[in-house]
Amino acid sequence: MRGITLALDAMGGDFGPDVIVPAALQALRYYPQLELLLVGKPAAITNYLVKYNSISNDRISIVPTKYIINSEAKPSQAILSSQGTSMRVALELIKVGRAHACVSAGNTGALMGLAKLVLTPIAGIHRPALMVILPHQNNGKTVVLDIGANIKCNAMMLVQFAIIGEVIAKQIIGVVNVPRVALLNIGAENTKGFGNIHQAAKILSNISSINYIGYLEANELLTGKTDIIVCEGFVGNVTLKTMEGVIRFFLSLIKSSDDSVQHNFSMNTNIVCNFSYMNPDKYNGAYLVGLCGTVIKSHGAANQQAFTTAITQAVKAVERQISKKIASRLAECWITTE
Amino acid sequence: MRGITLALDAMGGDFGPDVIVPAALQALRYYPQLELLLVGKPAAITNYLVKYNSISNDRISIVPTKYIINSEAKPSQAILSSQGTSMRVALELIKVGRAHACVSAGNTGALMGLAKLVLTPIAGIHRPALMVILPHQNNGKTVVLDIGANIKCNAMMLVQFAIIGEVIAKQIIGVVNVPRVALLNIGAENTKGFGNIHQAAKILSNISSINYIGYLEANELLTGKTDIIVCEGFVGNVTLKTMEGVIRFFLSLIKSSDDSVQHNFSMNTNIVCNFSYMNPDKYNGAYLVGLCGTVIKSHGAANQQAFTTAITQAVKAVERQISKKIASRLAECWITTE
């Protein structure tokens, strides 16, 4: 391997190689040191490489697989019959050292289950989490986890997610001061919400190296009051999707407004520019964190731009050696609490 | 009583009579048959009635009380020492038949607890819920409950919320066909989410008079795919606040865009008009449903327009005899399942 090598599940998502091949080519233009392994059906991938005049690009290799995990399949069943699928083979390429990370737009549940099976969690991590980096209104970013890997979490899982989020805030977002950590809750008072949240708050307050700032309500998610917000996977998933629904609705309104009134275009462009960084396509790529290896989950419906963004996330995670840094920060925090 | 009489907790919320008195006067202009009981400190209320030249308005009476429930107070403690507070007296006015309904912008937890204590739940209702009516992008409205009264719910509570929501969709929104009921979940598949959601889905599917359409994800909340969406109070509260945060952020962007570019104003106005019905001020007023009596909870930070909207909600609920209709629909559904 020279530079960074990523394994792409070329068959995953709603569009498979139709979107993933051009996204891969775009990413190669961004990163001269990047190499990509396109995992999937050779004929399908080749068709698109020919279409984009890239059949002889020596930074792309095809890793042939026969099978595909259906995006509608029940994760437990999909995992049972996952041998030889593009998703599993992409993950195995990390395990055997051929790739540094993997990106897939396939079945989320299957990807999480397989990643845990193939890559195993970092020592001490109870459960890996699904994490996303959201832009906020003060031109910064907020790390949100868990957004769906674990619908229910105990206090210690929430604490571990906070520590993982802290590493991401420093390494990926580039937060300079000690990152601020908040727990998502339905009020600022101690009595609000569930027992596991109260316990997590207590533990986080007692780790002196963590800048725990308390509970945050969901209407403050975009205000930039925190660098990391931690929640259980069910509520995290609902939060993210609620946000996505409102933003897509807003963007569609602006678009229809543009269509109906041709003049005054500059104003709309102005608003769109201000707001479009909130477009889910721009922050596509959820990190599956807490594993010995980097796995990025793209939206199933990702378009080319969105899938390229997901590849970008993988490159950054590899460059910053996220898994290794999570492991060492975790060890540090346990020392602090002793 | 002639027409409709409402008791307003004049001391509740962040602004008390400063907002509530002018909002009350505005509501009286909308509804010629409305009478209002302003419950609170007479001197404070009188000041504002004088300010608005309404001291001799014979459709307003002051019901004097000495005490106020602090909006930061722990609900259980607030309830213990609630005798003689504006919130409690406003609820008691329903109980003794002097008012048809009550509106308060005060401490949510205390209001829910006191309402249950003073008004008691409708026979058969396990737990009252907090409900909101949200506008959606197809020019209709969606009933969402529970948005915070019960952070955790069992399956039967979710089923009862669905039935309550159905009555509201028919009576308040005016849905003509059998209203569509969905459960909020993190995927459409049967295996997604928690056991209580799965059980509720099963029960709802078996009640033939209910138009249960399945699980809905949070990014579809504004699409108008359902008339009623049912969820547990924790996740409902987070969903609503997430939405509120994104919408307020969007409205602030448009405002700052307006300020910086004076021309092209028509375009922004156009977008604002399209979107402003999503402004939380416009749909202020959560219903506390499932009680023998109508209670509307206004945002604590409601401005005059928002508090008037909350009064409007109370008027509609009284006009449509919501509590009575919920009780009879509930009885009907149990007959259907037998």
Image: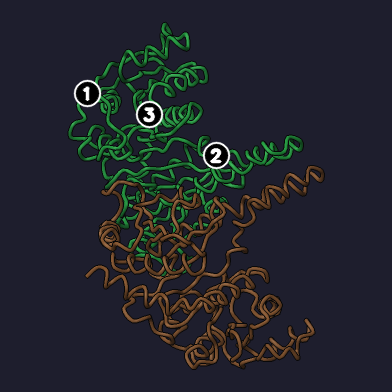
Chain colours: A green, B brown
Q: Same subunit under labels 1 and 2?
A: yes
Q: Position of residue B83 (x, y in %)?
A: 49, 92
| Vertical relation: B241 (above or below) B122 | above
Local SS, label 1: loop
Q: Give the left or right position of residue B31, taking residue B217 as reference.
A: right
Residue B296 location (% of width, % of height): 52, 75
Specify the label residue A103 is tagged with.
3
Amino acid type at circle 3 is: Val
- In the rendered image, which residue does mark 2 sit on? A279
Residue B107 vs A99, above or below: the answer is below
Task: Pick whichever of labels 1 and 2 is earlier in the sequence.
Answer: 1
Question: Which circle marks residue A84 in the picture?
Answer: 1
Helix or strand or loop: what does disc 3 sit on?
A: strand
Parent chain of label 3: A
Residue B147 is situated, as x and y percent measured from the top left of the image, at: 44, 65
Foreground: disc 3 or disc 1: 1
The amino acid on which the numbered mark 2 sits, given as a three-letter code, is: Asn
The residue closer to the viewer here, B10 or B68, is B10
Residue type, label 1:
Gly
* Mark 2 vs 3, N-terminal side: 3
Q: Chain of mark 2?
A: A
Q: Quadrant of residue A100?
A: top left
Which chain does the numbered disc 1 sit on? A
Report whether mark 3 lies on the same chain as mark 1: yes
Say which element carries label 2.
Answer: loop
Residue found 37% across the figure and 29% down from its top? A103
